[in-house]
Image (spheres, rainbow, N blue to C red):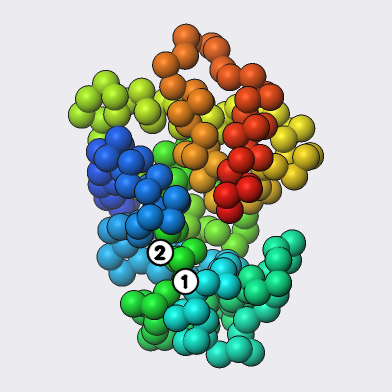
Amino acid sequence: MADSTDSDRPDLPAGDFSAWLRATRIALAGEGDAHVPCGTCTACCTSSQFVHLAPDETDTLARIPRALLFPAPGLPPGHRVLGYDEQGRCPMLVDGACSIYDHRPRTCRTYDCRVFPAAGIVPDEPTKVAIADRARRWRFDHPTPRDRAEHDAVRAAATSLEVHPELAADGLLPADTTGRAVAAVALSDLFSDLEEGDEPSVTLVREALVERRRRV
């Protein structure tokens, strides 16, 4: 990785926030792909990430050597994870590009590192330095009051999840920063149109997390 600091590199346009939020919710619901302007960035493919594959992803599963797939911990039989090599790279990354891009896993299709600046979260895992570097550079536009209000709601959701450790203790809140940022996006409607300083009850947030886990 280059030694240049964040100030040495240009910001990356993340798009209008409300439009991004709508598209991201569609992707998270399994109704479309995330369209991320990655350019030549492969940070998510080289950061020691396990990739989940569901049983219905038969086309993708058929294109990955069986020796690279392992049972997904905590999930029903048939769910698999694709690991990474000793350098933390996805084994399907060949010559700097995904060798099965048109048939890539659903996890990859919906991954979008813009969830981090959306939620105001910086990945702090040692293996996600490159992702954190990319995430810091994204800049959303807020052309309307709605864009700003929806961004504020996502960040409020992220803060609320952070200050209620009992949700994590119940196993409802993902331990990793990616999962927490995605959860904040998914739950942000609960934090819309509230008076300053207000937030939904922990019970309501818990119920939303339970429902979200059931759908996943």
Q: Name the foreground residue: 138 vs 112.
A: 112
Q: Position of residue 69 (x, y in %)?
A: 62, 81
* 141 sits to left or right of 75: left
Q: Quadrant of residue 164?
A: top right
Q: Quadrant of residue 73?
A: bottom right
Q: Around disc 1, counting alpha carbons within 10 Å, would you say few (fewer than 14), some (14 to 19), or many (20 or more)?
A: many
* 208 sits to left or right of 103: right
Seen in the picture, residue 21 relative to 84 is either above or below; the reply is above
Question: In what element is the residue under mark 1?
Answer: loop
Question: In what element is the residue under mark 2?
Answer: helix
Number of marks: 2
- Residue at (45% x, 81% y) in the render: 59
Residue 74 visible in the current orientation = yes
Q: Amino acid at mark 1?
A: Pro
Q: Position of residue 151 (x, y in %)?
A: 38, 30
Cβ–Cβ under 8 Å for marks 1 and 2 = yes
Q: Amino acid at mark 2?
A: Arg
- Residue at (62% x, 58% y) in the render: 126
Q: Position of residue 111 (x, y in %)?
A: 44, 58
Q: What is the quadrant of the N terminus in the image? A: bottom left
Q: Which mark is residue 109?
A: 2
Seen in the picture, residue 48 relative to 153 is either above or below; the reply is below
